[in-house]
Image (cartoon, rainbow, N blue to C red):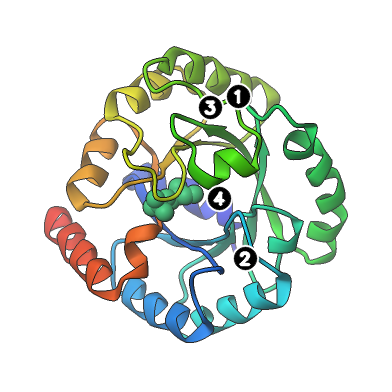
Amino acid sequence: MPGVLAGLMEARRKNPLLMALIDPEKYSPNTAGDIASALDDSPFYAILVGGSTAIWQSKVDDIILAMREKTAKPIIIFPGSISNLSPKADAVLFISLLNSDSTFYLIDQQFLAAPIVKGMSLEAIPTAYIIVGEGATAGFVGRARPIPEDRPELAAIYALTAGYLGFRLLYLEAGSGAKRPISPSFVETVKKASPVPVMAGGGIRTAAQVHELFDHGADIVVIGNVLENPSDAAELIRGLKALRA
Ligand code: 1GP
């Protein structure tokens, strides 16, 4: 069976991809199972599981197991910290927050996590993580020096750096619940310079916003917050299906 990264690169060759973010702080196993059912019949390619606060392993295990009963889509940890790791997932975005002022988010947690990831037999996907603009909780917790929204050229340099350092994905993060998503023109500038696929997330709420980001070069778009309300999630999925049809 191909690995998760190989599978997503293959899928990306046909279309840009959507990923759903499930924050274990915001879901119970029951509600996570419900959203996994809804996502199963939707254009979402994979499910990310992660958050910045109040996460512990048994909670993540329970949420992933509940989702596994409802969908066969890949489940990938998007860790805020080591306590977010779970052997029940298929893979982990092995992230380094490149614009953090703290070595804790750049390399120290990764040093502590590496033997655990190996022990859990998780596929590690080397991912450069960049906080842009508001940054929300991820920016605060990660001690980020966020890239100003009108300075995409700085993120483009990080993209080049990420490629030279051997990362396989670049994740541009406005922060979960950000008032404004990263702009399409920002994504376009970064994409032009990036040797690796570009992910964008934070504050994206509508199918139209998703498609605008795809049109400007995003390889992967991540949506979290809006899925927490079942009727908003259903409306978004309807909109995505309509735009894809
Ligand atoms: C946050 O990019 C993700 O890490 C998703 O953001 O929750 O605002 O959709 P939202």
Q: Nearer the viewer, mark 3 or mark 1?
A: 3
Is the CB atom of the residue marked by disc 1 within 8 angstroms of ligand 1's nearest atom?
A: no
- Confirm whether residue 189 shows in the render: yes
* Residue indicated by mark 4: 6
Q: Amino acid at mark 2?
A: Asp
Q: Gap between marks 3 and 4, in whole Å?
A: 30 Å
* Residue indicated by mark 2: 90
Q: Amino acid at mark 4?
A: Ala
- Number of the label disc, if any, that sits on residue 163: 1
Task: Give the mark nearest the N terminus, 3 or 2.
Answer: 2
Badge 1: how crowded within 10 Å, few (<14), some, or many (20+)? Answer: some
Q: Is residue 70 above or below residue 81?
A: below
Q: Which residue does the image show at 38% across and 82% down from the upper left?
A: 34
Check whether the beta carbons of the residues at disc 1 and disc 4 lie within 8 A of each other: no
Task: Give the x, y percent position of residue 186.
Answer: 35, 23
Task: Give the mark nearest the N terminus, 2 or 4.
Answer: 4
Q: Nearer the viewer, mark 3 or mark 2?
A: 3
Q: Nearer the viewer, mark 1 or mark 4?
A: 1
Q: Which residue does the image show at 74% across and 34% down from the upper left?
A: 106
Check whether the beta carbons of the residues at disc 1 and disc 2 lie within 8 A of each other: no
Q: Amino acid at mark 3?
A: Pro
Residue nearer the viewer, 57 or 87: 57
Q: Gap between marks 2 and 4, in whole Å?
A: 13 Å
Q: Gap between marks 1 and 2, in whole Å?
A: 24 Å
Task: Give the mark nearest the N terminus, 3 or 4.
Answer: 4
Q: Which quadrant of the view contains residue 85?
A: bottom right
Q: Nearer the viewer, mark 3 or mark 4?
A: 3
* Residue indicated by mark 3: 146
Badge 2: how crowded within 10 Å, few (<14), some, or many (20+)? Answer: some
Check whether the beta carbons of the residues at disc 3 and disc 4 lie within 8 A of each other: no
